[in-house]
Image: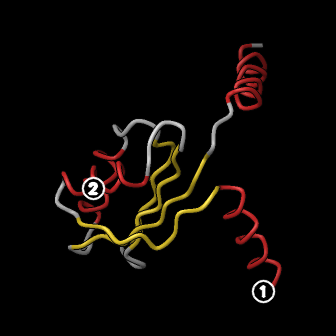
Amino acid sequence: MKQTLLIMLSSLLLMFGGKELRVLVMTPTPQMHCENCENKIKKNLRFETGVVKIETSVKEQTVTVTYDASKTTKENIQSAMKKIGYDTKVVSDSPKDKVKKREKAKADNK
């Protein structure tokens, strides 16, 4: 019962909340070398207002942040990265639905 209520409430919030989710992909300098680097980034970025999800990849040297554009900006996220010792170069910053369409197209082409 509680789960059903939570799902319904979440759906309503998404419909009327008007969140503009964006996906920011950055490359950090200095490079991430290990799991500790990834954890440092994740632990600190989660406190940035509007950050919804953080993914890191040492192999690809990317930090992917899904964020609510009505609460923060890519500049704020880059500033948060700078505070923990990483300069960043933006690879892409696009609406989440656009990223999903691109990923689906890639999967369909395989």
Give the x, y percent position of residue 81.
Answer: 27, 55
Residue shown at 55% from the left, 57% from the top:
23
Quadrant of the image containing the N terminus: top right
Label annotation for residue 67? none
Quarter of the figure with residue 15: top right
Residue shown at 27% from the left, 49% from the top:
80
Quadrant of the image containing the C terminus: bottom right
* Amino acid type of the residue that numbered disc 1 sits on in the rendered structure: Lys
Residue shown at 41% from the left, 71% from the top:
62
The residues bearing labels 1 and 2 have C-alpha atoms spaced at a distance of 35 Å
Quarter of the figure with residue 34: bottom left
Of the residues under marks 1 and 2, which one precedes in the sequence?
A: 2
User: Of tags 1 and 2, which is closer to the observer?
Assistant: 2
Q: Locate residue 58 relative to residue 32 in the image: left or right.
A: right
Q: Locate residue 76 relative to residue 51 in the image: left or right.
A: left
Label annotation for residue 110? 1
* Amino acid type of the residue that numbered disc 2 sits on in the rendered structure: Met
Q: Locate residue 52 relative to residue 7 in the image: left or right.
A: left
Residue at mark 2: 81
Residue shown at 61% from the left, 47% from the top:
21
Q: Is residue 3 above or below residue 40?
A: above
Give the x, y percent position of residue 43.
Answer: 30, 45
Of residues 91 and 6, the one nearer the viewer is 91
